[in-house]
Amino acid sequence: MQRLKNINDFQKFKNEKQPISMITCYDFAFARLAEQAGIDCLLVGDSLGNVVAGYGTTIPVTLDQMIYHAEIVRRGAPNTFLVCDLPFMSYHVSIEDTMRNCGRVMKETGSNALKLEGGRDFRNVVEALVKASIPVMGHLGLTPQSVHKLGGFTVQGRDEDKRRIMLEDAKMLEDAGAFSLVLEMVPEALAREISESLTIPTIGIGAGRYTDGQVLVINDLLGTDERYNPKYLKKYANLAKIVKDAITRYDAEVKEGKFPGEENTFK
């Protein structure tokens, strides 16, 4: 059984240049397997809106949905550091509203930290959460909750002004007390510059080779969706084919009267 990590472990990983492995996952079964494999950190992402619910964006995801999925992931992986995303509009209205929502997540899910998107506009939110002893993971670059404002799912920080703003935002989040930072779909050179300028660890997704860790969605790395092939993704399996082949064989055996066989019946 692995020891449950804490934020000091992740800081130690950066200091010792030990890459951090993180997987986004949404259910008990995959969480259990990820823990058995020894993954450093599990993220229950609001990307469940896309992956689990079939929405086009993360915006429809509710706080109750995040709590439900984080709760079942925690049961599957009781000894793995768990981060839960804060969904759209759960931390945007007021500090009081944010604290109430975040208190629910921490109490009801057993999460070890929360993640929120955005930079300078949410510095006061990060400060308030850290003051309340809630560890916060930041998120810059492509922030899916802002997809309409950004004009789509595109690489962020390519022009000089946006590069400068992202560097400043990263430092602001660190100063506000964030213990780590996700960088999503950012040019490799910029992600490297941010990572080297911060004392806290960075975790990349589509941010190149020089962040302090990497994160992928478990469904993506296992290849459950043959249609989804972004440049940043490496598929470590092709479960779509395996699952379809298994279901096809089951369907055929049921219709041919081969299943259940004698070995599948009770006396």
Image (spheres, helix red, strand yellow):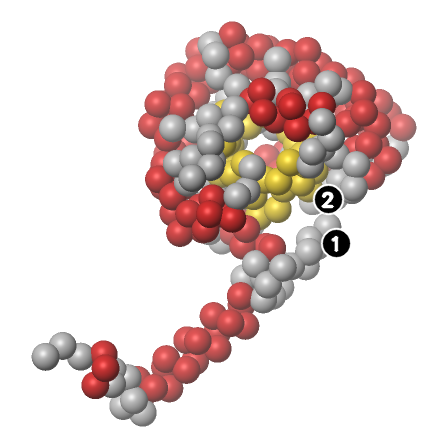
Q: Residues within 10 Å of mark 1 (few under 14, many from 20)?
A: few
Judged from the image, the secondary structure of the residue bearing numbered disc 2 is loop
Disc 1 target residue: 231
Judge whether residue 21 can be spotted in this image.
yes
Q: Nearer the viewer, residue 202 or 251?
A: 202
**Figure quadrant of residue 10:** top right
**Which amino acid lies under the numbered mark 1 shown in the image of this protein?**
Lys
Name of the residue lying farthest toward the top? 131
Q: Nearer the viewer, residue 143 or 184?
A: 184
Disc 2 target residue: 206
Residue 183: x and y, percent? 70, 33
Q: Is residue 171 above or below residue 32?
A: above
Would you say the residues marked 2 and 1 are in contact, meaning their CB atoms lie under 8 Å apart? yes
Residue 143: x and y, percent? 65, 34
Judged from the image, the secondary structure of the residue bearing numbered disc 1 is loop
Q: Is residue 19 above or below residue 216?
A: above
Judge whether residue 66 can be spotted in this image.
no
**Figure quadrant of residue 258:** bottom left
Q: Identify the mark nearer the N-term, 2 or 1.
A: 2
Where does the N terminus fall, quadrant-wise?
top left
In screen coordinates, is 60 left or right of 108?
A: right
Residue 113: x and y, percent? 50, 25
Query: Which residue occupies 60% across, 55% down?
Result: 221
Q: Nearer the viewer, residue 151 or 169?
A: 169
Count of marks placed on residues: 2
Residue 62: x and y, percent? 43, 35
Query: Which residue occupies 39% across, 19% down?
Result: 103
Where does the C terminus fall, quadrant-wise?
bottom left
Name of the residue lying farthest toward the front? 1
Query: Which residue occupies 86% across, 25% down?
Result: 161
Q: Residues within 10 Å of mark 2 (few under 14, many from 20)?
A: many
In screen coordinates, is 170 left or right of 102?
A: right
